[in-house]
């Protein structure tokens, strides 16, 4: 039904609040990068409007640091849409500080705690190989 796939990879040993935080931020990155993945707004039985959601399933996966880095490298090689979250961003309080923390990371080996990828199903599956469905 969908030509593309969205996968969110989250470092397996994070605290629950951190996993939820990373997943929320990365999902917003996918929506911002690919507005065509958004569905239509929702209306309740009384006609009240609610915001649109991503219109396709989002797979949330658990990953080791090695799998996160491999997935990031594969995403770039396969030209997938990619959003990333690094550990240092947990200690910031706003978007500009997040970008500064992100830019300060080693470009080859960032301390990734989360990664979102979107693109053709086959390429996303290959990029996320080794990650497990989050339990």
Image (cartoon, grey):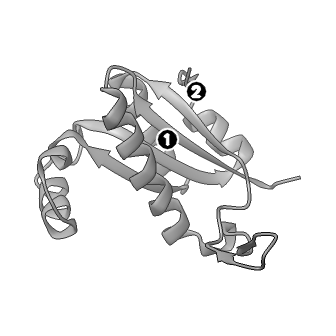
The image position of residue 135, as x and y in percent, is 56, 20
Please provide percent x and percent y for residue 49.
68, 78
Horizontally, residue 73 falls left or right of residue 117, namely left
Residue 6 in the figure: left or right of residue 67: right
- 3 versus 124 height, above or below: below
**Residue bearing the label numbered 1:** 74
Seen from this angle, which residue lies furthest right?
Answer: 1
Which secondary structure lies at badge 1?
Answer: helix
Quick one: label 1, few (<14), some, or many (20+) residues within 10 Å? some
Percent coordinates x, y for residue 63 in the rendering: 44, 25
Sequence-first disc among 2 and 1: 1
| Front of the two marks 2 and 1 | 2
Residue shown at 58% from the left, 26% from the top: 129
Relative placement, left or right, of 79 versus 109 is right
Q: At 15% from the left edge and 48% from the top edge, which residue is drawn?
A: 105
Dot 2: within a 10 Å radius of its alpha carbon, few (fewer than 14), some, or many (20 or more) residues? some
In the image shown, does 102 or 26 lie closer to the viewer? Answer: 26
Are the residues tagged 2 and 1 within 8 Å (C-beta)?
yes
Quadrant hosting residue 106: top left
As rendered, which of 10 and 42 lies closer to the eye? Answer: 42
Query: Compared to 34, does 134 lie above or below?
Result: above
Q: Which mark is residue 111?
A: none
Q: In the orientation shown, which residue stands out farthest toward the front?
A: 46
SS at mark 2 in the image: loop
Q: Which residue is at a point 50% across and 54% down the rendered structure image?
A: 27
At x 78%, y 76%, the residue is: 46
Q: Is residue 129 above or below residue 73?
A: above
Label at residue 129: 2
Can you give x and y, in whole percent of width and height, for residue 7 in the image? 58, 43
Q: CA distance from mark 2 to mark 1?
A: 10 Å
């Amino acid at each position: 039904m969908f030509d593309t796939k969205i996968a969110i990879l989250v470092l397996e040993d994070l605290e629950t609040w951190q996993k939820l935080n990373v997943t929320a931020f990365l999902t917003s990155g996918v929506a911002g990068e690919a507005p065509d993945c958004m569905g239509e707004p929702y209306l309740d039985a009384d006609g009240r409007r609610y915001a649109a959601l991503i219109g396709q399933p989002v797979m949330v996966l658990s990953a080791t640091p090695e799998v996160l880095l491999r997935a990031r490298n594969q995403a770039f090689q396969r030209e997938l849409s990619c959003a990333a979250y690094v550990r240092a961003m947990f200690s910031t309080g706003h978007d500009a500080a997040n970008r500064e923390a992100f830019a300060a990371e080693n470009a080859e080996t960032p301390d990734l705690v989360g990664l979102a990828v979107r693109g053709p199903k086959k390429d996303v599956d290959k990029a996320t190989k080794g990650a497990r469905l989050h339990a």
